[in-house]
Image: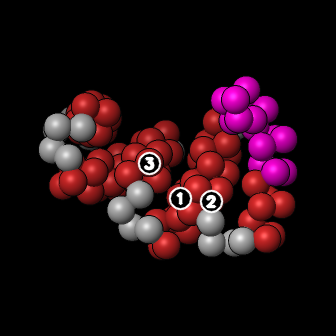
Amino acid sequence: MTLNQLQKYDEAIRTFNKALSINPNNVDVLYNKGLALSNLGRDAEAIQFYDKALAINPNNLDALYNKGISLYLLGNYTEAIQFYDKILDTDPNDAGALYNRGLALNQLRR
């Protein structure tokens, strides 16, 4: 199990920081640091790491999905929908993206 899976988010972030000091362009580490930050309720910071991962791999579905979640949690519903739409462009039947897109549309009363 990973530190994220064990919900040891602070420890995971320290480990990710060490890994990023060695390779700052590791998409998996950038994404997982974002996930740990999000799990701590630090979604604005998480988005920064999802963005770094997406700058390297714009098709990283996990980063797109979780950036959408963080945007939603921050009340940026319209922007969250844009990220769910990117996922749906790749897989129109992605249940998670469809569901979360619907939640964001509901918040916008659409």
What amino acid type should be assigned to the residue bearing mark 1? Tyr
Report the mark closest to the observer, 3 or 1. Answer: 3
First along the sequence among labels 2 and 3: 2
Q: Amino acid at mark 3?
A: Asp
| Residue 106 in sight | no
Is there a contact, CB below 8 Å, between mark 2 and mark 1?
yes
> From where the camera sits, is residue 90 visible?
yes
Q: CA separation, marks 3 and 1?
A: 9 Å
> Is 30 positioned to the left or the right of 21 in the image?
left
Q: Marks 2 and 3, how far apart in space? A: 11 Å
Q: Which residues are magenta?
A: 1-15
Residue 45 belongs to magenta span: no
Looking at the picture, tell me which residue is in the foreground, 85 or 20: 20
Residue where numbered disc 3 is placed: 62
Q: Which residue is found at the position 56% from the left and 62% from the top?
A: 27
Q: Amino acid at mark 2?
A: Leu
Q: Nearer the viewer, mark 2 or mark 1?
A: 2
As drawn, the residue found furthest toward the front would be 1
